[in-house]
Image (cartoon, rainbow, N blue to C red):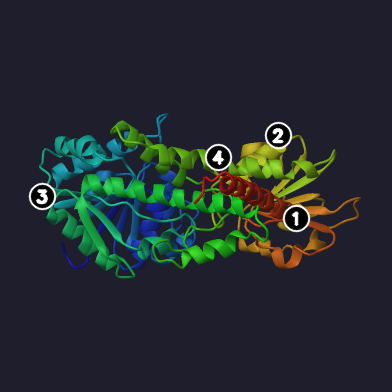
Amino acid sequence: MTENPIFSIVGLGKLGASMLGAIARRGFQVIGVDVNPRCVEAINQGHAPVYETDLEAAIATHHDRIRATTDVNEAVCRSDLTFVVVPTPSDENGAFTLEYVAKAFRGVGKALAAKKHYHNVVLTSTVLPGATRYGLLPILEQESEKKVGDDFGLCYSPEFIALGTVIRDFLNPDFLLIGESDKRAGSQLEQCYRLIMENNPPAVCMSIENAELAKIALNSYLTLKITFANTLAAVCEHIPGGNVDVVTRALGLDQRIGNKYLRGGLGYGGPCFPRDNSAFAYVANALGCSADLAETTDRLNRTWATRIVKRIRPWLKQGSTVAVLGLSYKPGTMIVEESQAAELTRGIARMGVKTVVYDPLARDAATAAWGAEIIVADSWQECVADADIAIVATPDPVFRLLRPQHFLKWRPGPAVVVDCWRLLEEHFSSHPGVVYLALGVADDAKGAAERLRTLWTAVSLVEKQSVAGGMVP
């Protein structure tokens, strides 16, 4: 490997295109490959083919180091290492299909046949244990008529990124996960990462199968942590003075737990967490192991949006208008796939009330998905202007600007604000014209106290009866 390796990336979606821009930003030549000519043309003209934070600037500024093509052979032959970053959609069982990866590997394999020098192939797409070695490696060897370890290397090295911060996350990972076909391949990939990354993360090299399992296990564990925090939030609503943020801040101080992903609110969503958790359950079942934990996490995660719909039902009247602030699965992205906020919105609309929604980035996705069924506002101010009930469904910073005067109008009763992320407590919790309902915060202190009193009074009576009957020494 030279001091200035040339990289190629097969697949220019959000992750692949962001890797392209990030690697160029770090000073290296990089060749992108995609089957979509429009994507290739956009990059060659200095534009991002998809929306992602800082991607347009990265491609425009470092355009002299970037080239895109539809020709896999050209890209592989003119580079030293190839990342394969193509979709692996979930099937009906929760497993990841290899259709697109297999097609990409056939192209890479044919290109390897023409190369005289060693080349490293790195699979970044998420796959299940065994897929790389037993499903994909044979394609490379068959098409290239070469042998892994001798003529080329193969690694499985997924990225741990979040949409909205892909470039930052890629260049500053907590650690490097490298599943290696052999030491040469793994060492070379680690050396390349050392040149690319802005921080100096630890590298963990292991077998390909261990790396495949580690990837889905990490995301599955995070879904468990998120669901536990949401369960805490539900409990906090039923104890006097309960506040999930107070509880989770204390838990997060314990180094065994930490505070990341420990924030009660709506559940997880998006293109990775739900499917990775389902895939973990699938592979556990397929190998004859228990998948109860992952399956329960998934089941609970699908209840949170319904819980909010039930919570606002008593406040709904004929002619009510409900405003939903936030549609994407998280702030900073336009993705509504598996979005809790989108599911919440659908649930409200099915109740037959007027539903107005706003999201800074996901407005087009909402319009395409629902058409005239739901009103899509052009601003958050417009969204809440005529609302009887306003629901803050995502913790987008712009929603912190909401104040009672933005939507309070003459009405026979108070307005209702449901704050799923506790962004607005300072301005809404004590306002006389607002019923403020924050997830994870008790709003019925008297009722909560009575429930606890009843619980422990019953226990006390049992204790007294036991002592009177001589059951306790």
Q: Residue furthest top?
A: 92
Q: Is residue 130 above or below residue 176?
A: above
Element type where label 3 sits in the image: loop
Identify the residue at image location x=45%, y=46%: 273
Q: Earlier in the sequence, mark 4 or mark 3?
A: 3
**CA separation in Å, label 4 and label 3:** 53 Å
| Nearest to viewer (mark 1 / mark 2) | 1
Q: Which mark is residue 446?
A: 1
Q: Mark 4 Cα within 10 Å, few/some/many (few <14, many 20+)?
A: some
Q: Is residue 199 above or below residue 277?
A: below
Q: Earlier in the sequence, mark 1 or mark 4?
A: 4
| Nearest to viewer (mark 1 / mark 4) | 1
Q: Earlier in the sequence, mark 2 or mark 4?
A: 4
Q: Which residue is mark 2?
A: 350
Q: Is residue 112 above or below residue 415?
A: above
Q: Residue furthest left?
A: 150
* Percent x, y of residue 112: 17, 44
Instruction: Say whether residue 79 is visible.
Output: no
Element type where label 1 sits in the image: helix
Name which residue type carries label 2. Arg
Left or right of 122? Residue 14 is: right
Identify the residue at image location x=45%, y=48%: 224
**CA separation in Å, label 2 and label 4:** 17 Å
Q: Which residue is mark 4?
A: 302
Q: Which mark is residue 116?
A: 3
Which is more toward the observer, 358 or 35? 358
Name which residue type carries label 1. Lys
Q: Earlier in the sequence, mark 1 or mark 3?
A: 3
Left or right of 412? Residue 299 is: left
